[in-house]
Image (cartoon, grey):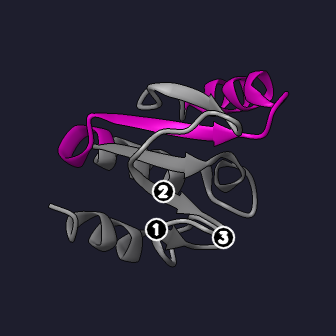
């Protein structure tokens, strides 16, 4: 199974360290791949952003918005888990939601 995260959840107001924790946990314990879904024309921006902030190492692939993949989708709207940011205040909730898939 794949974990798919909306790219906007990697940027502020999300906390990059918490975003990395979600990808680390997902890739290490639960999912085959962690994918970042980007709006068309923004993949380079997000890859550079993640790389500069040390949060790229558990991302397997950056999806364009017109590409489809099956998996568990974390998004601001329209996902399996809808959140407005990834931060220390909801990190435990996100990890518990991912654990419930096991």
Q: Which residue is mark 3?
A: 77
Give yes or no for contact between labels 1 and 3 (Cβ–Cβ under 8 Å): no
Q: Which residue is mark 1?
A: 80
In-front residue for pair 73/15 = 73
Relative to 42, say whether 88 is above or below.
below
Relative to 77, say whether 58 is above or below.
above
- Across and down, in percent, residue 67 comes to 62, 33
Q: Quadrant for residue 45, please give it.
A: top right
Q: Which residue is mark 2?
A: 73
- Across and down, in percent, residue 33 comes to 35, 33
Q: Residue at x 38, y 77 (%)?
A: 93
Q: CA distance from mark 2 to mark 1?
A: 5 Å
The dot on residue 46 is none
Q: CA distance from mark 1 to mark 3?
A: 9 Å
Magenta extent: 27-54
* Local secondary structure at mark 1: loop
- Across and down, in percent, residue 49 comes to 72, 31
């Amino acid at each position: 199974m794949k974990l798919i995260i909306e790219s906007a959840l990697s940027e502020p107001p999300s906390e990059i360290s918490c975003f990395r924790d979600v990808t680390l946990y997902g890739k290490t314990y639960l999912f085959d791949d962690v994918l970042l879904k980007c709006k068309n024309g923004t993949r380079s921006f997000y890859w550079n952003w993640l790389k500069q902030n040390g949060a790229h190492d558990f991302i397997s692939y950056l999806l364009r918005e017109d590409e489809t993949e099956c998996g568990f989708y974390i998004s601001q709207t329209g996902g399996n888990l809808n959140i407005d940011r990834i931060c220390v205040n909801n990190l435990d909730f996100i990890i518990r939601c991912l654990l419930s898939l096991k």
